[in-house]
Image (cartoon, rainbow, N blue to C red):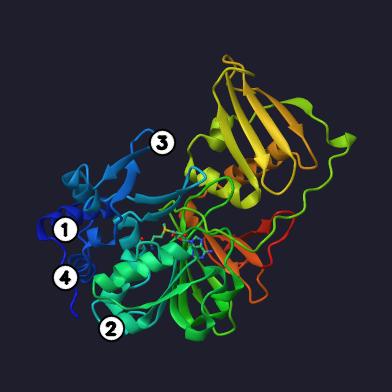
Amino acid sequence: MSAPSAQTAPTRQLLDQVARFLGSPVPAALERALRTVPRHLFLPDRVWRGDGQGGYRLCDRAADPQGWMDAAYSDVSLITQFTDGLPSSSASMPSMVLRTLQLAGLDADAASGRPRTVAEMGTATGFNAALLCALLGDRAVTTIELDEALAHTGERNLRAAGYSPTVVHGDAAAGRPERAPYDLILATFSVDRIPTAWTRQTAPGGRIITPWNSAWCCYGTLAATTDQDGTTSGRFHSFAAFMPMQRPSTSPDAAAPTGPEHLPHTTTGTLSPWAAAGGDLDAEFHIGLAVPGAFFAWDTSGDHAPVRLEVADTTGPSWAAVDYDGQHGDRFTVTQAGPRHLWDEITAAYDHWTGLGRPRVDQHGLTVSPDGTHALWLDAPNGPANGRFLFPIRIGNRNHLV
Ligand SMILES: C[S@@+](CC[C@H](N)C(=O)[O-])C[C@H]1O[C@@H](n2cnc3c(N)ncnc32)[C@H](O)[C@@H]1O
């Protein structure tokens, strides 16, 4: 069965928006794929788009068919499901999808430059899987979705649009060994570690492309290559904030007990909370890698101080609060409690980052050894002699082994 073609005028609108975002024309192979796969066929009748103020606006096909169709062919991510009030599935922003396809070499016109087999992690609507089928053929594509209902919907959408890749309901962290090895593993959610199954299931010379997150900062995309011995290494790219991978089976590190030596204590600090958490993605990306588990929220209620940055630890009971008194931009009241002195760790990470010359996201890279150890580097992957080896990435309070 041949796929119905995408609506011409709306697709032109989408292609123009994507080209504007990419800053260059959409490569011919990807333009063909986007023209072949009608995005609206993959959307439920109710989707939510950002309202520009941190919230979401419903687009209901029944109430506003034109608005719904306009959303389908706009370069925006569309939320398709909320869980506990938070987005848990979406149709990704088309320009982000295309940039990851570009990173994967799928914009190459010659088949020789392209991967032959791909495992997509996170099927959701099936739209990206359909693009992969249009580019590589159905048999090349395996796509894995954790949520059973979404896996069924994604498969139904794909079949209705004329595509039949292998759709798997399961945890993408385990990959799909039966169909391995893959020339490409492409995640459409963000991770804070590379699952061991992914490096094991990537063919030598194959690539792993995945959006990244830490508790501090959800940003960046890793594009890494796996070599003969299973070592995977590559650089981060400065784009994309994808919803995080859900981990059904892992339990968090046990929280350390809080003793009297862990009671709140107050000092004065000089690091501005805005420097560490005010939107400088290069700094926040580095802090996130260096201070595992730390996350933040701003409190502007005025209850404690004119502005307070609250910091806490996903892996234990530690917390910190950094108060701005409304007058002094060079000193802040810092309260810390728990076994970790989170603000001290963040200050050290920030100082390290400035001492390194404030490296950008895309100067950072990651090497994952066959034993699962993750090591971060700057500029080049070869350790202290050539590049600058930074530190092993820790998850929780242990070295990062998965
Ligand atoms: C941003 S959406 C993916 C968008 C999708 N590729 C598309 O084209 O519409 C992320 C999806 O990843 C799924 N997901 C999250 N964690 C997962 C896991 N551990 N295994 C498989 N799927 C997962 C979510 O349920 C969600 O549907």
Q: Which residue lies furthest to the left in this view?
A: 9
**Distance CA(mark 4)–CA(mark 2):** 24 Å
Which residue is under mark 4? 4
Q: Quadrant of residue 44?
A: bottom left
Q: Residue furthest right?
A: 260
Which residue is under mark 3? 54
**Distance CA(mark 3)–CA(mark 1):** 27 Å
Which residue is under mark 1? 11
Q: Mark 1 or mark 4, which is nearer the start of the sequence?
A: 4
What amino acid is at disc 1?
Thr
What amino acid is at disc 3?
Gly
**Distance CA(mark 1)–CA(mark 2):** 25 Å
Image vertical order of residue 250 relative to residue 16, above or below? below
Camera-side residue of 85 and 375? 85
Camera-side residue of 239 and 6? 6
**Distance CA(mark 4)–CA(mark 3):** 35 Å
> Which label is found at residue 236?
none
> Which marked residue is nearer to the observer: mark 4 or mark 3?
4
Which residue is under mark 2? 111
Q: Residue furthest top?
A: 327
Local secondary structure at mark 3: loop
